[in-house]
Amino acid sequence: MYATLCFSVLPLVQAFLRDSSTPITDETAHIGHTTTIASATVVDTLTAASTRACNGYQEFCSRRYSNITYVGTHNSPFDAPNNLASNQDADVISQLNSGIRMLQGQTHVVNGVVYYCHTSCDLLNAGTASAYFTNITSWLAANPFEVLTILIANGDYVSVANFTPAIESSGLSSYAYQPPAHPMHLQEWPTLGDLITQNKRAIIFMDYNANQSTIPYILDEFSQIWETLMDPTNQSFSCAIQRPPELIDAQKPDIMYLMNHNLDLTLTIAGTEIVVPDIARLNETNAISGIGSLGMAANNCAATWGIPPNFLLVDYYNAINGSVFQVAAQLNGVTYDATPISTAVPTNTTPEIPPPGGTLPSVLQSTPPSVVPSTVAFISGTTRLQVRNRLLLAYSALALFLL
């Protein structure tokens, strides 16, 4: 009701601003980000009509979308308990309610249906893209002052047309932002306030095979975002450009960038290498400071490129209470606030039929329930995630022996 009243006032305030002959200028600066607003913008509207902020901070209303650092979850839907391929241990709605504002995930197509699956749908199947997008759409509807980025990893390199049925049937397309140009450079993106007023609060990117000339709301990632090393296994976390390769020698690309900060380790099972999160070192990887920390890596990249990363992509974002959000707040020049900034909505729990195909040995899919309690009871001072990591390593070795 409150949001409805707020938005009913917006047209009146905007009409007043349009009729005003006095331009309003505002320079908003913070660590590494500077945005100049040449005329009255929606931030005035939001201030007058609501005490709510944009993505949790009133300062963000006048900042360009490209002028903010967001925390993102790597492989966001993969939160299956005790599964070797999981990257998170909270569902997507919980992630959003905590403050995550970029959701990334790998997709695969089975019998014409797009699923969110990690490497293979036989390893970890998180359900259909339609169900995933439906949950997100419900959350956006319940949180009208939040702007969200969705990064689709097109694991099978299929045509972008495969994704439109799920996006449109879920209702997500109605929130999808369509930029006026391609590519969009740093100073061309709208402010969060503009996106909120237009109710185009979902910015959808795809890594491979996007085609904005035919589907303008699925944006090509690598012409507008570059990335640091993917699947890093070294705590040094290089700030060099890895993707797209044509930008590797660029001095300072005029587009946004994503910092991959999900430390991995490589396992070899039956002659096949599998990259999994290095859970044992999460307390270092997701920390505010220290060797291998998110804070140190982000500051290094900010010093290297002159601006902070736009996206911090992490595994198990909640391993240390609020640390990843504190890093983003420091980069954004705002004060971290642990208060939830969104409205919870129920998760879609409708059962889904998994795609056909073989299955991995059960030892790779889950930890035997009878083992966990007795094991944890004898390991004092060890976190649940560390226990899980060690068990998975042991079971992977056992699977190799069995195969």
Image: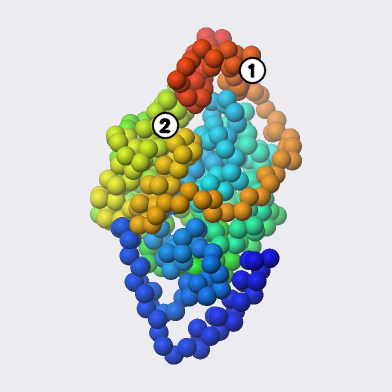
Is residue 267 visible in the rendered structure shown here?
yes
Which residue is label 1 attached to?
369
Q: In the structure shown, which secondary structural element does the residue marked by tag 2 occupy? A: helix
Residue 174 percent across, percent down from the top left: 64, 62
Q: Is residue 45 above or below residue 310?
A: below
Q: Nearer the viewer, residue 8 or 122?
A: 8
**Which image quarter: residue 9?**
bottom right
Q: Is residue 256 above or below residue 198?
A: above
Residue 14 percent across, percent down from the top left: 54, 80
Quarter of the figure that contains the C terminus: top right
Q: Is residue 352 above or below residue 392?
A: below
Q: In the structure shown, which secondary structural element does the residue marked by tag 1 occupy? A: loop
Q: Is residue 127 left or right of residue 33?
A: right
Residue 335 percent across, percent down from the top left: 39, 55
Disc 1 from disc 2: Cα separation: 24 Å
Q: Nearer the viewer, residue 193 or 254?
A: 193
Within 10 Å of the Cα at label 2, are there few (<14), some (14-19), or many (20+) other Cα atoms? many
Q: Is residue 291 left or right of residue 368?
A: left
Three-letter amino acid code at the position of disc 1: Pro
Which residue is label 2 attached to?
282
Badge 1 or badge 2: first in the primary sequence: 2
Residue 381 percent across, percent down from the top left: 45, 20
Is residue 207 visible in the rendered structure shown here?
no
Q: Residue at x 57, y 48 (%)?
A: 97
Q: How is the image coloured?
A: rainbow
Q: Residue at x 30, y 36 (%)?
A: 290
Q: Nearer the viewer, residue 13 or 111?
A: 13
Q: Residue furthest top?
A: 401
Q: In the rendered picture of this protein, how many numbered marks are placed on residues? A: 2
Q: Residue at x 27, y 53 (%)?
A: 305
Three-letter amino acid code at the position of disc 2: Leu
